[in-house]
Image (cartoon, helix red, strand yellow):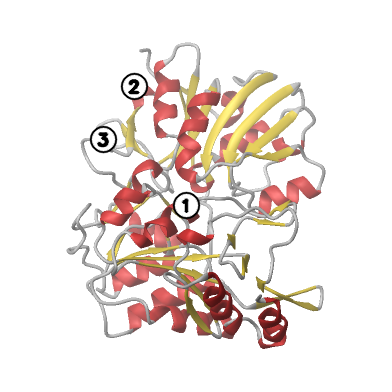
Amino acid sequence: MSPARVCTAAEAAALVGTRDSLGIPLGPGQPAAFLHALGGRDDWQDLVVHGALLIDLYTVFTRSGVRLRTGFMGPAERFLLASGADVEFVPADFRRFSLVAERVAPRVVATAASAIDQDGYLSLSLHAGATIDEMRRAGANPDRVLIVEANARLPRTYGVEPEFPHRIHIDDIDVLVESDLQPFVLPDAPVTATEAAIARNASAFIHDGCTLQTGIGGVPSMIATLLAEGPGGDYGVHSEMFTNGLMRLHQAGKVTNRRKLIHEGYSVATFAAGTLDLYEWLDGNEDVRFLPVDQINDPAIVAANKDMVTINGALLVDLNGQVAADTIGHTQYSGIGGHEDFIAMSGFQLEDRALVCLPSASEVGGVLLPRIVAELPSGTSVTTPRHHVDVIITEWGAAELAGLTVRERARALADIAHPDFRDELHAAIS
């Protein structure tokens, strides 16, 4: 294989055909300078981009002749779609993204990485996800192109050698783009009184020595804060996303990872997003390892962890216990991600708990709307089926659904609904 060609972002963008296919990773793995450079062109005839959870409003997706097929609708995708861009959702959980990528086999694959080390390797930094295998296949195929954007500001992180090295050698890259853009920053959102109450209710299910998975948002952040400040500890971490809150839990000395049965001794995740402090803390830190999503989100591997406690959110829950976490009606709001994978494992061991946390109601346009409903709105897709659901938590308490009858589940959910809607929910229970 010939040595990597070193290009500017604009030169790399010129290598993409007017009719072409491009694959990019989810979120923090996206090569920002390269994607911005693509927006400098307006000659596209049919460029199809396969990705998920954009971290910026890249101009290229506003161009005529460009189509985005996304596995996760984030704020950028929703804005682009509302603005008239050609954005379509591809239903797949995060673990199946790798199969989708292999089936699509985009001609060009582009990813972000850290700067080259003294041995010629580039760490894949904040993202392992579902694109590593397809990235390597593209680099080995002379008819395809692998573009790697080496960003000097990205942290050098580690995988688990030798099976999951989380790095690529310069000799396995077709095109190298050097950049020093500031990484995507996800600050902590202020925690509301409602979120704090939900976090307190959820923390009652977390005990010393358990292994934690936390998602994004104010509730997981507040839970991590409560755990960091509380008396407990000896926790393990096996999480799809590594967050600011999990960093603080480490810094408080509460994470040992010594009781895990798989990946003992270090925390594992498939991507990280947070503040610059988080990225600085991750740089060169072997206490956290990044693995492909088919390892992190495999329910069998998740369930093999000792005393696994998963913490996830939802948009709506109906009285059957069905969870809608990615759509409301016919509107695609986010993505499937690892929601069902992490919740499904809760039935494998008695000590495992899967917590689904959400406010009991939300104000939309000045109108208070319930989040626990008698029936999901027409067109709403179920993200996680009722038979996988363990505990639903709102600011009013926790409904432990496992082992309850249909009627008992409905009553337990109505009891933790917003007071303004409880009577009508109880009336709807036949």
Q: Callout 3: 10 Å neighbours few (<14), some, many (20+)?
A: few
Q: Is residue 37 left or right of residue 253?
A: right
**Residue lying at 22% horizontally and 52% vertically, measured from the top left:** 262
Q: CA distance from mark 2 to mark 1?
A: 33 Å
Tell me the tag on residue 338.
1
Disc 2, disc 1: CB below 8 Å?
A: no
Query: Mark 3 or mark 2: which comes first in sequence?
Result: 3
Q: CA distance from mark 3 to mark 2?
A: 13 Å
Q: CA distance from mark 1 to mark 3?
A: 36 Å
Amino acid beneath label 2 = Asp
**Residue lying at 71% horizontally and 32% vertically, measured from the top left:** 67
Amino acid beneath label 1 = Gly
Tell me the tag on residue 171.
2
Where is residue 59? Give x, y as percent: 72, 40
Q: Secondary structure at mark 2?
A: helix
Above or below residue 317? Residue 34 is above
Q: Secondary structure at mark 3?
A: loop
Q: Mark 1 or mark 3: which is in front? A: 1
